Image (tube, helix red, strand yellow):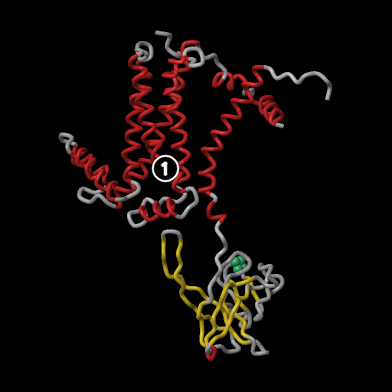
Amino acid sequence: MLQKIYDWVDERVDITPLWRDIADHEVPEHVNPAHNFSAFVYCFGGLTFFVTVIQILSGMFLTMYYVPDIENAWKSVYYLQTEVAHGQIVRGMHHWGASVVIVMLFLHTLRVFFQGAYKKPRELNWIVGVLIFFIMLGLGLTGYLLPWDNKAYFATVVTLEIAEGIPIVGEMTKTLLAGNPEIVGAQTLTRFFAIHVFFLPAALFALMAVHFILIRKQGISGPM
Amino acid sequence: MSEKKQQVSRRQFLNYTLTGVGGFMAAGMLAPMVRFAIDPVLQPASTGDYQAVAQLEDITNEPQRFDWTIDQIDAWYESEVTKSAWVYKDDNDEIIALSPVCKHLGCFVSWAGSDEHPDQFYCPCHDGRYYKDGVNVPGTPPAAALDEFEYKTEDGTLYLGKAKPRGA
Ligand code: FES
């Protein structure tokens, strides 16, 4: 059955070469942990991607219940966590996954750094990777506010104060983020929500696409 | 089956185990999320308590609209919601309490809502009509009679329960 559907599509759009480009390629010996266990360090990039997928999925499901509004945000989070089946698990996945992503990203960065894998011609991909790192930090930062509890609120107050510390454009940056020059409130929450679920993920997808295309183009760096 | 041993090649074996392990991981990941998403479907149906709606002495042979408010808990949002019923006594002095929800697509029907049909229920959305006993007028959009409330009377007060479709 599946084979038939595949053949039907393949006959029309010839997906086999595409499929081969994406998934069917040899894993060099020096990155295969089955061959030499220390090669497990090459897994961190993939693990980052794996956890990112979990974040995307759990985030999509969480927005089924979450409301980005100062009256209801906390209540909706409380409701989904205490009343909805498996709410605690799904929110837990998103909460802990956010930290795991940063850890994996960091380990991946360390591996690339200490192996010198960022050297020419891969500097460009290093830059893309650093941008992804910043995007991830931004996602963590904006997501932190969304439950709208005390910790979230004051963490964001601190963040905005730091942003205000930027010379010259500081005050403007703060207002731009908070949506109001004085209040950290209704508009801050909706802005952070929009940034967290639309703007940053869009940027993340674009950068990840570039990151992966570059890996395929340039290949995995050789053994040390 | 022939006597030949079923041969599983190394490649096949790896394929099966990898697909199995991958599928298991994906399922473990998705199961809580899917259960989380479908939770509303699996909630038990509400029982529908009886609510005091009207004094019996106010009920006449002409359908009248009675409103009452309930405390509605909508997940994290609590509010007071107004419910309505069309109530009258039929020729046998039986109380009839009809739901105002149109059986076509759910608009609000009114007794004598149309000047042309003063003795019928009328739905403004698509000109649906019902006779006084709630039965839909053939040739108008609704395909069923108006739901009827379960009721009980106590100390001269009418209490309404859940609105039930006819014949249920
Ligand atoms: S909803 Fe009443 S006639 Fe269509």
Q: Nearer the viewer, residue B108 or A37?
A: A37
Q: Is residue B126 visible?
A: no
Residue A132 screen position, x and y as percent: 36, 28
Residue A53 screen position, x and y as percent: 47, 33
Residue A83 screen position, x and y as percent: 46, 55
Mark 1 secondary-structure assignment: helix
Residue B16 screen position, x and y as percent: 64, 25
Mark 1 falls within which chain? A
Residue A149 horizontal side relative to residue B157, left or right: left
Q: Quadrant of the N terminus of chain B?
A: top right
Q: Quadrant of the C terminus of chain B?
A: bottom right
Q: Where is residue A138, by image quadrant?
A: top left
Task: For label 1, count other residues whose C-alpha is less than 10 Å away and answer few (under 14), some (14-19) or many (20+).
Answer: some
Which amino acid type is marked by label 1?
Answer: Gly
Looking at the image, which residue is at 53% across and 52% down? B39
Residue wearing tag 1: A92
Looking at the image, which residue is at 39% across and 31% down? A101
Q: Is residue B131 above or below residue B3?
A: below
Looking at the image, which residue is at 53% across and 73% down? B49
Q: How many marks?
A: 1
